Amino acid sequence: MSNPLSRSFQRRRAIRSGDVDASGVPAAWDAISPEEDRPVDLNRRYEQLSARVAELQWDLGGLVYEMAARDAIRPDVLIARAAVLQEADAELAEVERILLTEQTGNAGQCANCGAPHSSGAVYCWQCGTALLSQAAPAA
């Protein structure tokens, strides 16, 4: 596990060298690309996204601290960084949901009682509610 202090120095070096994107995030962080020709290894992607979200949280916290210490809070910068973090966190949550679905065989929850169901289920095993709604015929 790398030292958070060394990550901070690496980040500052990337910013000084101009190797950052429009939101101020070092370009190396965006090297994780889901659009590859080969199938995505979801476990590997989960680990990458986990590390990226942790790094973004660390940096956002440090940024807020530095701004507060200098009494120079810039909401526009914080919002931009928080948006990057939120996007990465949403992708992480989706990958985690897919992995959990694969591991447990659950495809969702019953809208009536909340019981989990598999992808092929037609009726809820707990309350008997139909899981598949029929589309109304087009008029």
Image (spheres, helix red, strand yellow):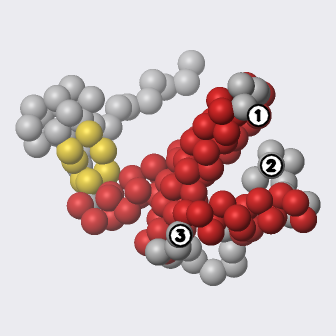
Instruction: Determine the residue positioned at 32% across, 37% down.
Output: 132
Instruction: Determine the residue positioned at 23% across, 61% down.
Output: 104
Quarter assignment of residue 111: top left
| Outermost residue toward the right in this view | 18
Q: CA distance from mark 2 to mark 1?
A: 9 Å
Note whether 2 is above or below 8 in the view shown. below
Q: Nearer the viewer, residue 6 or 43?
A: 6
Q: Nearer the viewer, residue 14 or 33?
A: 14
Residue type indicated by callout 1: Val
Q: Going by the image, does 20 lie left or right of 28?
A: right
Identify residue for label 3. 3
Q: Residues within 10 Å of mark 2 (few under 14, many from 20)?
A: some
Question: Quadrant of the image for the C terminus?
Answer: top right
Residue 66 drawn at (x, y percent) = 67, 39
Residue 123 drawn at (x, y percent) = 19, 40
Q: Which mark is residue 24?
A: 2
